[in-house]
Amino acid sequence: MSKKVIIGLSGGVDSSVAAYLLKEQGYDVEALFMINWKDSSVTLRGDCSWEEDLIVAKLVAKKLNIPLHVVDSSDDYMDNVADYMFSEYEKGRTPNPDVLCNREIKFDVFIKRVEEIGADYFATGHYCRKGEIKQNGKTIYRLLAGSDPNKDQSYFLCQLSQEQINKALFPIGDIVKPEVRRIAKELDLASADKKDSQGICFVGKVDLPTFLQQKLKAKKGEIIEIPKDAVPNETEMAKGAKDEIEKLKMLCTNRKYRKQDGKVLSTHNGAHFFTIGQRKGLDIGGTAEPLFVIATDIQENVIYVGQGKKHPGLYRPGLFVPKGEIHWIRPDLKLQPGQNDDCLVRIRYRQPLQKATLHRKEEGLYIVFEEPQRGITSGQFAAWYKGDELLGSGVIN
C-alpha cells in the first residue's frame, strides 16, 4: 500500500512540480490549499490575490488528477504570524514573517490537517533537502541546503523541529529551478509561467510602510545624520576588554547613538516604519552620498542615518541571541554554556554564508563574524550551518 502525502499546493510552479514528482515516486498524493489572509481592513498591493492562486491550484490539481482540500486558516495566521509581525515592528524590530509562517502555519497547522486527513507525510515546494542518521538506535533528521545554490530556501525553515522535519518531504530539493520550469511546461501546468511569489508569506507583494501604517500609528520624529568618524570601532575597543564576556558584549551589542552625535536633517512619520540598511522612504536629497538608516530609537522616536553604503554604522562585528530565543534543529549538537564552535552563518535569505564563531554563555549565544556584517537588525533570524546542514537559529537581540 502506497504512503499518503499531502502537498501544500500554493498555485506556484514549485509546489505544482513537487506534487507531480511525488506521484511519479508512487505516493498517494492529495493537495491542500490554505487561505491565510482575509483581513479586509488592510489594503494589499500585489500581482495576484489568494483567489487567483486558488484558481491555478485547482487547475493544477485537476491536471495531475489529485484531490484538493481548501482550508481557511486565516485566524491562525493572524494570531501566530501577523500579530507578531506588527508587534515586532512597533518595538522597532524587523521580523521575518516567512520564517514564522513556516514554523507556525505550514509545519504546524498544516501538519495537524495532514494528521486529520490520515496522511503519512506533508510535502512542500521548498528548495531544501532532508537527510537522516542513526544515533544510538534513534533517527535524527537533518535539514540540508537545496541543490540549486541560487534558490536554496533552507533559511526559511530554520525554526523547524525534529518532529516537523520527520513528517516533511521536499521533492524538488535536489533539482534546479530551470529544470522545475521545464517539467511544468512539458506537463502544460497552469503554473508553468507563473512568477515566483514575492513579499510576505501568504500576503504577497506589498508596500510595507503603507501596510504597517494601516495598523501602526504615525508619529513625527527627527532624522539625524551621524558622521562616519562618530561611529565607535568595537573591534578596537574589545582589545582592551578585561575578560571574554566584556569583549563579546562590546562586539555583539547594539550601538546606541545620541542626538548630539549628529545633526538634524529632516523629520519622519514613525521610527517603527524603518529598518537598518533602508534607503528608500527617507525623502532627503542634497547629500554627497545616498543616506541609509544605521539605527532607530523607538523610545525617542529618532532615526539615525549615515552617508554611503560603506558607512561604518551599517556594519557590526557580531550579534547576540538571548538564551530563550536559541533554537536547535539538531539538539544533539547543541552548545552548552562555556562551549564555542566555528560555523557558517547567515542573517537573511540568500545572503552568502559567513564564517563566524559561536560562543555559548549562560545569558545566550554570541556570534562573532570573521568579517563585519552589513545590516544586522534586531528581530531578524540568524541561522548557523556546518557545510550544507542547517543546525539551528535564533532571533537577533
Image (tube, rainbow, N blue to C red):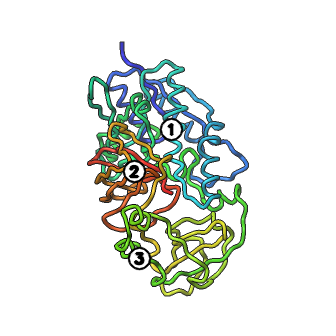
Q: Quadrant of residue 126?
A: top left
Q: For the residues carrying marks 2 and 3, which lies nearer the camera in this image?
A: 3
Task: Please name the residue shown 35% across and 34% down the image.
Answer: 171
> Which element type, helix, strand or loop, lies under badge 2?
strand
The residue that label 3 is drawn on is 233
Q: Quadrant of the N terminus?
A: top left
The structure residue drawn at horizontal position 47% and vertical position 52%, both measured from the top left corner, is 363
- Can you see residue 96? yes
Callout 2, which amino acid? Ala
Q: Tell me where residue 359 appears, x and y as whole percent.
A: 36, 54
Image coordinates for residue 15, horizontal then vertical, percent: 43, 37
First along the sequence among labels 1 and 2: 1
Residue at point 33% right, 53% down?
150
> Of label 1 and label 3, which has the lower sequence position?
1
Q: Give the residue at the far front of this rendering.
A: 242
User: To which residue does mark 1 refer?
Assistant: 10
Q: Which residue is mark 2?
A: 383
Could you tell me if the residues under marks 1 and 2 are in contact, i.e. CB atoms within 8 Å?
A: no
Q: In the rendered structure, which amino acid carries the disc numbered 1?
A: Ser
From the viewer's perspective, is 78 left or right of 323? right
| Viewer can see residue 157 | no
Instruction: Point out the tag, 2 or 3, that comes first from the N-terminus.
Output: 3
